Amino acid sequence: MKQLLEFSPLIAFFAAYPLGGIYVATAVLIVVAVAQTTIQWIKYRTVSRMTIASSILAVVFGGLTLVVHDDAFIKWKFSIIYWLLACVLALSTFFGRKPLLEQALGEQMHLDRAVWAKATWAWVVFLLIAGALNVYVIYHFETPFWMKFKAAMIGVSFIFTLVLTFWLVSKLPPEASERAPDSK
């Protein structure tokens, strides 16, 4: 349920677009982002930093899109989120005791710090490229194509996550029982 709530603004944005175009989808995105943040606070008494950042960007860039009537603002929101997340991940490798990915997944996967660093940098590069591609599509294609591109990027992100997860699993150390010689 919590994961569905995390993706509700994006789902609402894509659902509203065919019904009323980019401006209706943007208005829906703003309303759902604010509702998502409010519901998370009421239900869990905490809101993730990513949800707060995404909601603020939705309100600011979505608001600009609606006021100025220029859809480039809402399209830029996605690149900015990608780049902010890339910066946070990159900085987490230099500051703090563990990279952010290790903090998030380290309890489930006990890996060397170097493996976590490589996974973190893979995400940083992926997010930087995704943000740059988004900007390219904004200025070289019409909104219907951008919507398809954005939807495709969700799939690409999912595939990237799967590939990186399989890579991380391949780096797990063998179980202690497998390393111990048989005692007969």
Image (cartoon, rainbow, N blue to C red):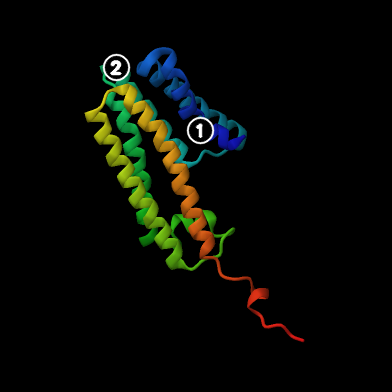
Residue beneath disc 2? 67
Quadrant for residue 13, please give it.
top left
Inspect the image, locate mark 2, and give the three-letter code of the amino acid beneath it: Val
150, above or below 129, in the image: above
**Does residue 112 appear left or right of residue 64 in this picture?**
right
Residue 49, percent from left and from top: 45, 42
Structural distance between the alpha carbons of marks 2 and 1: 25 Å
159, above or below 91, in the image: above
From this viewpoint, which residue is outermost toward the bottom? 184
Quadrant of the frame with the C terminus:
bottom right
Q: Which mark is residue 7?
A: 1
**Does residue 141 appear left or right of residue 81 in this picture?**
left
Inspect the image, locate mark 1, and give the three-letter code of the amino acid beneath it: Phe
Residue 155, percent from left and from top: 45, 38
Residue 139, percent from left and from top: 22, 29
Residue 47, percent from left and from top: 52, 38
Q: Which mark is residue 52?
A: none
